[in-house]
């Protein structure tokens, strides 16, 4: 065991029997404990973080988060580590909504300069099938997805659309969904 | 513009699978929590997907996020504390290593940094190994006070995460999350 048996741990009948046989030795008591026994510690109030310890990430995150707020957007997009889900995060950095990608995986997340839009380039696992998903950061939701003939390499935002740069070309993807706007 | 078909379908929210990192605690803010009146357990058990069960603390509301469950103190619109019961997944080798890996992935995903752990615990119950990690963090949303609790039973790895936006909320409510964890049992597959 990595941690010794703690004072106050309750032992099951089997453990108590063995303990008697062992003359009180604590050996193997945790192994034979019948139930999970955890003591929840008290956590002290956290002091304000030292700027030096959080500066690089805090600055980057603040820039990303601040843009939507300043421009009226409310969210930003973050792919999960397994790239199988998009999380729409509020200004507090916590999730407002999740967008599962199914068998697709996020390859790149790009936010527009005004903080109102994001585009996520995705690829189907094991297949040469690509797509771009547009997200409305003001409404904090995914709008629509458009298939791409090849892998998206980069994007740039223009008036009312995002231009996805592909190998040997580019494709225009409208930002707003014509069905809802 | 294609609005239907499989790629487009991806943007429609649907239940999230058992992936740990696919589950988030929503709307956690720094507002004071409404504290449940009692830590006594509810008699009814809740389930996490088809493979585990647990007994929820009395006075907590429960919602599902795919195969995972999110519990919040009832009447606490601000949700200053939440319990996340993550759907079990297969054991992947060494328990301690898997626990560390899963916890690290969640810390990264939630943007938790500058961890200050307190009293990590590890043991072996009749049902399987278990581990607990308690820590406070910095995050973009302010300080976070967390419990990461994991167990492996019947070749399944399950994790319960408790989060609070203040040390006061943690110290009042974290024991209830721990108590929930002790009732977690894998169901026969």
Image: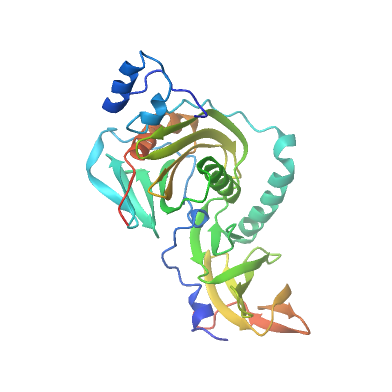
- At horizontal 76% and vertical 81% (from top left) the residue drawn is A167
Q: Is residue A104 left or right of residue B154?
A: right
Residue A181 visible from this viewpoint: no
| Residue B146, horizontal then vertical, whole percent | 50, 37
- At horizontal 41% and vertical 52% (from top left) the residue drawn is B88
- At horizontal 49% and vertical 29% (from top left) the residue drawn is A1
- At horizontal 57% and vertical 46% (from top left) the residue drawn is B101
- Residue furthest to the front in view is A21
- State the image quarter where residue A171 is shown: bottom right
Q: Is residue B87 left or right of residue A10?
A: right
| Residue A121, horizontal then vertical, whole percent | 64, 72
| Residue A59, horizontal then vertical, whole percent | 72, 47
Quarter containing the N terminus of chain B: bottom right
Q: Is residue B52 above or below residue A133?
A: above
Q: Is residue B188 left or right of residue B22?
A: left
| Residue A36, horizontal then vertical, whole percent | 37, 33
- State the image quarter where residue B170 is shown: top left
- Residue furthest to the left in view is B43
Residue A31 visible from this viewpoint: yes
């Amino acid at each position: 065991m990595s941690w010794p048996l703690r004072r106050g741990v309750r032992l099951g009948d089997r453990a108590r029997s063995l303990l008697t046989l062992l003359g009180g030795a604590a050996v193997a008591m945790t192994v034979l404990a019948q139930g999970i026994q955890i003591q929840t510690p008290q956590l002290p109030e956290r002091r304000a973080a030292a700027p030096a310890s959080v500066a690089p990430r805090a600055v980057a995150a603040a820039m990303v988060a601040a843009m939507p707020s300043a421009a009226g957007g409310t969210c930003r997009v973050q792919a999960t580590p397994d790239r199988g889900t998009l999380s729409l995060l509020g200004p507090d950095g916590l999730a407002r909504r999740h967008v599962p990608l199914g068998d697709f995986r996020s390859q790149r997340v790009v936010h527009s300069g005004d903080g109102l839009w994001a585009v996520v380039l995705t690829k189907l696992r094991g297949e040469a099938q690509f797509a771009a998903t547009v997200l409305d950061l003001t409404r904090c939701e995914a709008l629509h997805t458009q298939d791409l003939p090849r892998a998206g390499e980069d994007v740039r935002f223009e008036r009312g659309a995002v231009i996805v740069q592909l190998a040997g070309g580019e494709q225009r993807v409208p930002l707003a969904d014509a069905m809802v706007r | 513009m294609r609005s239907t078909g499989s790629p487009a379908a991806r943007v429609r929210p649907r239940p999230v699978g058992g992936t740990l990192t696919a589950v988030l605690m929503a709307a956690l803010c720094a507002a004071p929590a409404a504290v449940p009146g009692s830590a006594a357990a509810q008699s009814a058990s809740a389930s996490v997907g088809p493979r585990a069960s647990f007994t929820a603390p009395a006075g907590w509301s429960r919602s599902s996020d795919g195969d995972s469950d999110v519990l919040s103190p009832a009447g606490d619109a601000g949700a200053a504390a939440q319990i996340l019961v993550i759907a079990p997944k297969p054991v992947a080798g060494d328990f301690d290593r898997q626990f560390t890996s899963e916890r690290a992935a969640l810390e990264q995903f939630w943007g938790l940094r500058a961890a200050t752990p307190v009293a990590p615990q590890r043991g072996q119950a009749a049902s399987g190994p278990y581990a607990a990690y308690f820590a406070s963090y910095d995050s973009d949303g302010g300080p976070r006070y967390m419990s990461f609790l994991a167990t492996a039973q019947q070749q399944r790895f399950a994790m319960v995460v408790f989060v609070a936006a203040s040390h006061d909320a943690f110290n009042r409510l974290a024991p209830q999350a721990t108590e929930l964890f002790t009732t977690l049992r894998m169901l026969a597959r």
